[in-house]
Amino acid sequence: MAEGSEERAWEELIPDALSLIFRNLSLQEILTVIPRVCKSWGRVVSGPYCWQEIDIEEWSLRCKPEQLDQMLHMLIARSCGSFRRLSVSGLHTESMFSFIADHAGSLQRLELPRSEISDSIAEVIAPRLSNVTFLDISYCRKIGARAIEAFGKHCRSLIVLRRRMHPLEVADKVCQDEEAYAIAVTMPKLRHLELAYLLLTTRAVLDILASCKDLEYLDLRGCWDVKLDQKYLKERHSGLKVLGPDIIDCYEQSCWDGCSDYSDSSVYTWDFMEDGEDVYEGLSDDDSIWEDDQGLEGFEVRFYGGGFSDAVTGFDWPPSP
């Protein structure tokens, strides 16, 4: 740099500043491109600066279980236990839940949608998640009231809980009031609660409202058996916004608006995550399913929530490959 110049080279920026800039890049770019720019940038992405927030949910929807475990081990290790947010989908192995909990001293926001967590695993790891204030356990089919109670007892500062389900995932259940009662008893500080499509009764929801006096937002979409009196809500919970149970669909708007044909296929071909196998090998379109001359009579398609966005359906489908 020329003497007396007021400009500074990019590599001289402090790590905290560089990490803020790198957050605008994709996960693949941070891990494969940035380290090759210069040594100082490589040190930043190898250290804790870039991994205060670990958000790999979109990537985890596409990867293999062994790749997911490998990635989490690497990123959590790089964070040096200082990560404040972790967002990952479809976590399968019990050892990974324990590994996350063992390094969760600074963790405040934990998002584990579609994970294979069970009641017993939740009871084991919950005592090590005492700083968590935001918990997302949506679409986790193997947990119930025991897990909710464990999280509530140990995450005493919890203010946001997402426990959304898909209608097909609760089709074999009769009632999930026990989960609502566990929330009412153990999570009095909640301000934001999402229970879309849980099989709840009005009595269970009223117990939540009686206990969680700071509640500002309640998502009851698809909780068809819940009947809340609007006059009661205005008189007793005037500051509460309730979404549902009934869903107002805007079918006059195309549900494809806002969708994109773009898909970054490069996420499937990371050199450092490839094992040399073609994940699509052996897969093909089976045209035989249309060769029975049945036509499409009686074929029914249902859209829950009126669209495909997370804000409407509560179900985060990945973009089409």
Image: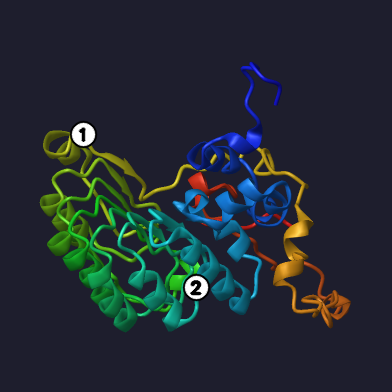
Residue 14 rendering spot, x and y as whole percentages = 52, 37
Q: Which residue is mark 1?
A: 239
Viewport quadrant of the N terminus? top right
Residue 170 rendering spot, x and y as whole percentages = 42, 72
Say how the picture is coloured: rainbow
Please, what secondary structure does the residue beneath circle 1 have?
Answer: loop
Please, what secondary structure does the residue beneath circle 2 have?
Answer: loop
Viewport quadrant of the C terminus? bottom right
Residue 125 rendering spot, x and y as whole percentages = 30, 75
**Which of the two residues, 240 or 84, is positioned nearer the viewer here?**
84
Residue 275 rendering spot, x and y as whole percentages = 75, 79
Marks 2 & 1, CB-CB < 8 Å contact: no
At x 64% / y 61%, what residue is drawn?
301
**Which of the two residues, 73 or 223, is positioned nearer the viewer here?**
73
At x 42% / y 82%, what residue is drawn?
94
Marks 2 and 1: which is nearer the front?
A: 2
Amino acid at dot 2: Leu
Which residue is farthest front? 3
Describe residue 275's horizontal placement relative to residue 70 as left or right.
right
Please tell me whether residue 226 is drawn above or below residue 72 in the rendered image. above
- Which of the numbered marks, if any, corresponds to residue 91? 2
Amino acid at dot 1: Gly
First in sequence, mark 2 or 1: give its number.
2
At x 28% / y 74%, what residue is drawn?
147
Describe residue 110's horizontal placement relative to residue 77 as left or right.
left
